[in-house]
Image (cartoon, helix red, strand yellow):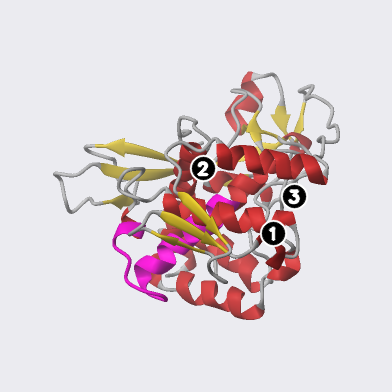
Amino acid sequence: MSTAESRTDPYQAVTNIIIEHLERGVVPWRCPWQREVGIPRNFHTGKTYNGINVLLLGMRHMASPYWLTFRQAQELGGHVRKGEHGTHIIKAGESKSASADDATREDAEQPQRRRVFLRKYTVFNAVQIEGINFPASSPIPTLCGSERIAAAEQIVTEMQLPPAIQEGMSTAACYRMATDTVQMPAFTSFESAEAYHLTLFHELVHATGHPKRLNRESLNKHDGFGGKVYSQEELVAEMGAAFLGMETHIVRDAHEHSAAYLQSWLNVLRVKDHKRWIVQAASQAGKAVAFIMNKHPATDS
């Protein structure tokens, strides 16, 4: 796809950004937010961003958690400093007759199904805006090791309709849909309690795809290790585990991802037909996390 085409295609634009980071050895979903700053939020609405927008804003490494559109800054009596470049985020919507401006649609060839489109927005960080008194940035309270583990254990024990968790019966972590069980290696085989819980989070996200929970297509149409559907589901689980890690202040070690791991995702995401994967996986991961934490799924923002 040409540069001009990617500018008009939100899916491709987002995928290109993720690919650029992977090529530099950075896994955007490893830590999708800035721990020292906090989860990004819109200053005008007070709502936190979610899904793919957490990654898009987190990758900018801005010093403030607050963001505004150009118009919102004006409405609040401020202005974006000359020369500043904004950050693109996306919002999903549904329409029976989306306009040509909403160029990227899903299932447009199937009028009997809903049509989903993405609209790009540009936002600016508080450090790029003048004339508005944003709250002073203050260090985000960091949970100590025992607090992180307690928070993780609480999420696991309070999950609605949980699968059975069997520990020590296998040397590999996995979710088995046929028996609705999560198999975990012995706790002592992990380097840390944090690593154990991130792995458990990954498998619990898989479990949310069971028909009695979210009935996620990428789990139910499993096509075997390395297959297209398998890769889609793995991306959902990777992001979901990272989002749960965000809730508990547990972050995967940056050195855990091998060159082979990075290359495997680059190979998958460079395929033109896979341009929707990142956006869709982030959305599905958000729904999985909401299910695990007994929350209403957030709308894309």
Which span is picked out in magenta? Answer: 219-241
At x 52%, y 44%, the residue is 51
Query: Callout 2, which amino acid?
Result: Val
What predominant SS class does the magenta segment belong to? helix
In the image, farthest residue toward the bottom: 260
Residue 225 within the segment the image draws in magenta: yes
Q: Secondary structure at mark 3?
A: loop
Give the vertical position of 150 relative to 133 (above or below).
below
Please give the residue where the numbered disc 2 appears in the rendered image.
289
Q: Which mark is residue 195?
A: 1
Please give the residue where the numbered disc 3 appears in the rendered image.
61
At x 41%, y 75%, the residue is 225
In this image, 76 relative to 286: left or right? right
Q: Is residue 273 visible?
A: no
Instruction: Name which of mark 3 and mark 2 comes first in the sequence.
Output: 3
Badge 1, how many Cα within 10 Å: few under 14, some, many 20+? Answer: some
